[in-house]
Image (tube, grey):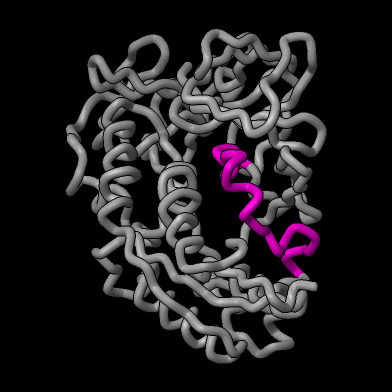
Amino acid sequence: MNSSKKIILGMSGGVDSSISAVILKDMGYKVSGLFMKNWEEDDTNNQCSSKKDYEDALRISKKLGIKLSIVNFSDKYWDLVFKNFIIELNQGKTPNPDIFCNEKIKFDYFMNHALSLGCDKVATGHYAMLKNGNEINTLHMPLDKIKDQTYFLYILKQKIMKDLLFPLENIHKNDVKKIAKDFDLKVYEKKESMGICFIGKKDFSRFIQKYINSKPGLIIDEDGHELGEHHGLFNYTIGQRRGINIGGKKGYPDKPWFVIKKVMSNNTLIISQDESRLLRNGDVNISKTNWINIIPQSNIIYHARFRHGGKLIPIKISLTSDTSVKIKLMESERAITPGQSAVIYKDDECIGGGIIDA
């Protein structure tokens, strides 16, 4: 019976964490909510305001009859997530702050704080599945493969997984929205947060220039012909098509342009109209690896995702150190991008991953 077990649920004010509360209550748990504030500079137009999100979470918790508390990790977020995000942008990489946040804040400071309040387990509204053994815990894809968020969770450690619940592991997103509608929880109409929450729908370039070293430079083709000027390499990522603002150029076919390389040494953006130049074959190096349960073996074929929602690519792995590996691609993949994560799977189990170096 779950009636005596206390669960603290991370509530964001969105539909997924709200319906996680409904599911946990239906399972008989004693549920309390905990809202995490990570950013002090709220968006004044309410497009990604933590104040508005907290108000939504508070309204939902009252409707469901659960207590909601708030904890502020803005200082930790600044030191452990945002500073690293800026450093990597300055290095020409495309970092993923959501993964940094999960590793450094949500499944560390937030989870330890929740456990210190006397709960039996901590829950979040991620679409992922946990399987708990006597000593070993494993992470798996959820029922809803489209919403699968294991890409963001490869950083999980064994020591915390026994205290963790993912209530949405066996439900589809459409059913989550239906439950919210049945309970008249208006968050089913709320748009999902996309990208970096503290930036929201604000102009990324204008926002980030307050924190990053930015200067204009040349846009060239692969033969070195000048095509235009960029306004900071941080605005671009490998494979990007929109926002290059080149337009029709005399002597070039009427085809789209793609970012294929950022040269930090001379502040140059290289673009091409040949999309096949984005296809990667051969080896990919990753570092800062985390292996949840098993260390991969060199004689086994695994699969890897190189972006959230990306296709699973068959690979083999060679360990190069305790924290780095070389991935051998067995199929080509498009736009593998330094700073993003390569996440490794054995069947439906997420076994870990690391940061793409080159």
Q: Position of residue 104 (x, y in %)?
A: 41, 45
One can see residue 130 in this view: yes
**Coordinates of residue 293 in the picture (x, y in percent):** 68, 31
Give the residue displayed 52% in from the left and 66% down from the top: 10
Q: Is residue 49 above or below residue 230?
A: below
Q: Is residue 322 above or below residue 14?
A: above
Q: Is residue 138 visible?
A: no
Q: Is residue 251 magenta?
A: no
Assess whether residue 169 is covered by the magenta stretch.
yes
Numbered range of the magenta stretch:
151-174
Residue 348 coordinates in the image, percent (x, y): 79, 38
Q: Which quarter of the rendered picture does the N terminus lie within?
A: bottom right
Residue 50 left/right relative to 66: left
Looking at the image, which residue is at 42% across and 24% down? Answer: 271
Identify the residue shown where x is 64% and y is 75%.
Answer: 21
Viewed as shown, does residue 11 lie left or right of 318? left
What residue sits 50% from the left and 19% below the top? 323
The quadrant holding residue 91 is top left
**Left or right: 218 as drawn, with respect to 93:** left
